[in-house]
């Protein structure tokens, strides 16, 4: 038996909510920032960023969860996203549900990603009824890996993989996988 779905996951400092039109411009700005996107192949154009929001919103309609827009409760500022994404690209651990995050650089170093990610896990293991949630990142993305470790996820090096969308030989291609099962999650 799963808990009733909570429409707006929230934490002490953050709201995790569906996307608004007004988020698009701010999201495009952070997706265009080479520092935010340094662990991806390249920054996104405005069109690519908007198409990403469209895909995120479509996934909410299909699954009831997704990559929530994260808003700071204190002043309503849009910070980025955190949430759950179904992944079915070709890899030994897919299909799976991933917990992921991307924040504007002004929002780094405050614990927001960790706080939002714990709430995403709570939603995933609670209302969404998932048995396992994974997270993955380039092995060079230490800030993201630190979030995975802070929320209690664990890595088995045997799970490491080459991300198929990144060309062979590229320094970002090697990825690590972190996992957490429902019974391991400490609320
Ligand atoms: C990955 C990413 C979200 C991590 O952001 P972050 O700010 O380092 O992580 P958190 O929000 O959990 O903040 C933790 C830091 O805030 C500090 N902090 C400050 N105040 C805090 C508070 N009140 N509570 C908790 N932590 C606090 C912690 O000490 C920690 O710093 P440290 O890592 O230097 O020890 C961010 O780097 C990012 O958006 N990167 C670009 C996109 C990306 O690569 N996404 C992941 C793709 S796999």
Image (cartoon, grey):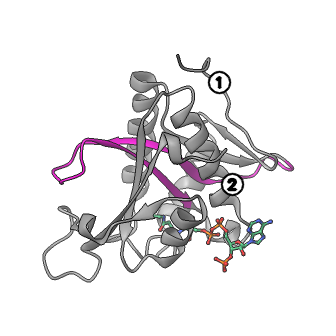
State the residue at coordinates (75%, 52%): 77
Q: Is residue 10 left or right of residue 128?
A: right
Distance in Å between CA atoms under marks 1 and 2: 18 Å
Q: State left or right for residue 83 relative to residue 172.
A: right
Which element is circle 1 on? Answer: loop
Q: Nearer the viewer, residue 63 or 147?
A: 147
Please name which of the two marks, 1 or 2, marks the residue nearer to the observer: 2
Residue 8, image x and y in percent?
68, 30
Displayed-image quarter of ligand 1: bottom right
Return the residue at label 2: 115
Beta carbon at label 2 within 8 Å of ligand 1: yes
Tell whether circle 1 marks a residue whose Cβ is less than 8 angstroms from ligand 1.
Answer: no
Q: Which residues are magenta?
A: 74-102
Task: Kindly identify the residue that appears in the image at 48 percent across and 37 percent down.
Answer: 66
Instruction: Give the farthest residue toward the right.
Output: 74
Disc with the residue nearer the chain's start (1 vs 2): 1
Residue 32 x, y percent position in the rendering: 47, 66
Q: Quadrant of residue 173?
A: bottom left
Given residues 156 and 45, the one toward you in this image is 156
Is 149 placed above or below 58 here?
A: below
Residue to which mark 1 is pinned: 7
Q: Which quarter of the figure has residue 119? A: top right
């Amino acid at each position: 038996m799963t808990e009733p779905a909570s429409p707006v996951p929230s934490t002490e400092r953050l709201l995790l909510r569906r996307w608004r039109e007004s988020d698009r411009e701010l999201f495009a700005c952070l997706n265009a920032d080479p520092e935010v996107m340094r662990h991806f192949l390249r920054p996104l154009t405005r069109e690519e960023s908007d198409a990403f929001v469209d895909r995120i919103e479509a996934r909410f309609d299909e699954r009831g969860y997704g990559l929530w827009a994260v808003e700071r409760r204190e002043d309503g500022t849009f910070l980025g996203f955190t949430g759950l994404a179904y992944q079915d690209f070709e890899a030994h651990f897919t299909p799976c549900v991933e917990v992921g995050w991307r924040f504007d650089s002004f929002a780094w170093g405050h614990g927001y990603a960790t706080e939002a990610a714990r709430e995403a896990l709570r939603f995933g293991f609670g209302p969404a009824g998932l048995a396992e949630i994974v997270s993955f990142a380039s092995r060079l993305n230490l800030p993201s890996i630190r979030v995975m470790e802070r929320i209690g996820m664990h890595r088995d090096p045997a799970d490491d993989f080459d991300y198929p969308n990144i060309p062979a030989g590229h320094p970002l291609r090697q990825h690590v996988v972190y996992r957490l099962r429902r019974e391991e999650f400490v609320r």
